[in-house]
Image: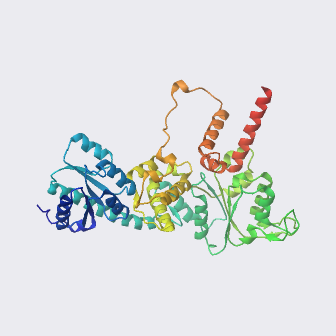
């Protein structure tokens, strides 16, 4: 019995027939080819797995009872090699329970012998149509991805579109801008977009991480220094404000600066003048300043840790970049963007994520925001061996997500807020295996703030021990 002539899309669905009976293989292959499906056959499960790994087939028709490897074992191996493979199990001992078990384990269908070829044809036609539709969707998504990029920032959620629109409005007119948002949300990308859209886009864009340097080195980095002005100053150097004169300077983590540095920055903004360390000469500069912070600077001003006059100078225009938890609808498009980026970087062709991997990513809270998502996709792209990234390619903490929920009433006890903060920071540090930089990113605070808190906590612990 032959299958009826199929639609042209059948030619895009290669099928592999696996059975320990060569006659059954030959018969099924012939029928499938007559129906318009590219078909190959084998009696060796390992050869079928190699074809899957090399992308030689999209569907495998598998006999459940084989001496070399049973159907469930083959199913597990096939999905491990390529989560996008469709496996149809065929058995002479059909039961509803075994069919349900097969579907639960990832099989696409479960058929009984002798094969009902019209039903098989219908199943394969459904797969061919779905496969063709996904190909078209992927092509449309690639085009859409290009339209959803704003100077390197990707998103379609209302929250991020609002950022794009505000950046477009102010780019030509700003002199000082404050960008706020949690760590890893993309504040530097917004700063670069502002510069690229500004009238000084052809001039230099200089970046300084204010939390990475102690005050003396930060002052030298920004304002420059004269030879011999301090130990190690073996030559005269211009600072970033001179280097980017006419362009833009991006001051990241401005909330980490000391009171003395804040005073120097205020003078620069007010007078557009700089003075190199160790030099009496005052120089005029014309730079646009973009500052960024993950802190609440209004709260810092009220606490006396940030100058109010500097805050108002910087925040005449403020752009708030939302965290990934506020724009969850952007996760799929960001995943697609990073898959394309790292697929090209590593010389791999990815078609997407398996359903299990997609579910894991969508359920995650992303405390590290877009930066964390990019790191996950980058690492998974290295680990993946097939066309799809599967759950096993993701980091371990995403494979087995922590169960979230309320603490049972019986375990709850009232504690001071300082104690809650201490416990939370300790748990984050443990989850980061003691990596303080990573912990600071997850907590959404600067490294300096974390170091200061740990130092204070250690002092309090030592005092308590002495008192005891």
Who is closer to the viewer here, 336 or 55? 55
How many numbered discs sit on the rendered protein?
Answer: 0
Quarter that holds the C terminus:
top right
Instruction: Please name whichever residue, 198 or 394, is drawn nearer the observer in this view of the structure.
Output: 394
Residue 67 in picture, x, y percent from top left: 27, 50
| Residue 11 lies in quadrant | bottom left
Relative horizontal placement of residue 393, taking residue 111 as reference (left or right):
right
Q: Position of residue 410 (x, y in %)?
A: 53, 24
Q: Relative to 163, is 145 on the left or the right?
A: left
Residue in the foreground of this view, choosing between 29 and 299: 29
**Quarter-wise, where is residue 156 in the image?**
bottom left
- As drawn, which residue projects farthest toward the left? 1
The quarter of the displayed image where residue 124 is located: bottom left
At x 22%, y 41%, the residue is 96
Residue farthest to the front?
Answer: 67
In this rendering, does residue 215 appear at all?
A: yes
**Quick check: 178 above or below 419?**
below
Does residue 322 appear in this view?
no
Question: Vertically, is 461 above or below 119?
Answer: above
In which quadrant will I find the N terminus?
bottom left
Taking the view exactly as shown, the residue that stands out farthest to the bottom is: 202
Residue 75: image location, x then y, percent: 32, 51
Name which residue lies at 79% across and 56% down: 215
Residue in the picture at 51% in, 67% down = 345
- Give left or right: position of 204 versus 43: right
Colouring method of the image = rainbow
| Residue 319 x %, y % | 59, 57
Q: Which of 319 and 181 is in front in this view?
A: 181
């Amino acid at each position: 019995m032959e299958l009826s002539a199929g639609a042209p899309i059948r030619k895009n669905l290669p099928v592999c027939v696996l059975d320990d009976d060569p006659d059954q293989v030959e018969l099924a292959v012939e029928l499938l080819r007559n129906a318009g499906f590219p078909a190959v056959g084998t009696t060796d499960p390992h050869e079928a797995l190699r074809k899957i790994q090399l992308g030689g087939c999209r569907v495998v028709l598998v006999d459940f009872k084989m001496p070399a490897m049973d159907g469930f074992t083959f199913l597990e191996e096939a999905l491990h090699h390529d989560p996008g493979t469709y496996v149809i199990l065929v058995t002479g001992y059909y039961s509803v329970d075994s069919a349900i078990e097969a579907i639960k384990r990832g099989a696409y269908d479960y058929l009984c012998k002798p094969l009902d070829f019209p039903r098989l044809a219908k199943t394969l036609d459904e797969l061919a149509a779905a496969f063709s539709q996904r190909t078209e969707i992927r092509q449309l998504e690639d085009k859409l991805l290009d339209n959803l990029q704003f100077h390197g920032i990707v998103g379609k959620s209302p929250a991020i579109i609002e950022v794009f629109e505000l950046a477009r409005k102010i780019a030509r007119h700003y002199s000082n801008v404050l960008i706020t948002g949690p760590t890893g949300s993309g504040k530097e990308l917004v700063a670069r977009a502002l510069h690229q859209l500004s009238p000084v886009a052809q001039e230099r864009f200089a970046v300084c991480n204010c939390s990475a340097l102690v005050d003396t080195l930060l002052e030298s980095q920004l304002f420059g220094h004269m030879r011999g002005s301090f130990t190690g100053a073996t030559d005269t150097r211009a600072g970033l404000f001179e280097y980017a004169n006419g362009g833009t300077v991006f001051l990241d983590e401005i909330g980490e600066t000391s009171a003395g540095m804040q005073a120097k920055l205020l003078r620069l903004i007010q007078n557009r003048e700089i003075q190199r360390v160790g030099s009496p000469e005052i120089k005029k500069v014309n730079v646009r300043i973009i500052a960024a912070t993950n802190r609440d600077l209004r709260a810092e001003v009220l606490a006396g840790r940030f100058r109010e006059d500097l805050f108002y100078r910087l925040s005449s225009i403020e752009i708030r970049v939302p965290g990934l938890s506020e724009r969850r609808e952007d996760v799929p498009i960001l995943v697609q963007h990073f898959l394309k980026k790292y697929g090209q970087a590593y010389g791999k062709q990815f078609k997407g994520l398996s359903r299990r991997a997609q579910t894991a990513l969508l359920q995650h809270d992303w405390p590290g925001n877009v930066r964390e998502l990019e790191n996950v996709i980058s690492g998974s792209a290295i680990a993946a061996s097939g066309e799809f990234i599967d759950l096993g390619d993701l980091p371990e903490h995403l494979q087995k997500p922590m169960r979230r929920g309320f603490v049972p009433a019986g375990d709850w006890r009232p504690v001071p807020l300082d104690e809650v903060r201490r416990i939370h920071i300790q748990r984050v540090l443990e989850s980061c295996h003691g990596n303080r930089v990573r912990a600071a990113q997850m907590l959404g605070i600067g490294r300096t703030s974390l170091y200061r808190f740990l130092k204070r906590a250690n002092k309090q612990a030592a005092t308590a021990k002495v008192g005891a």
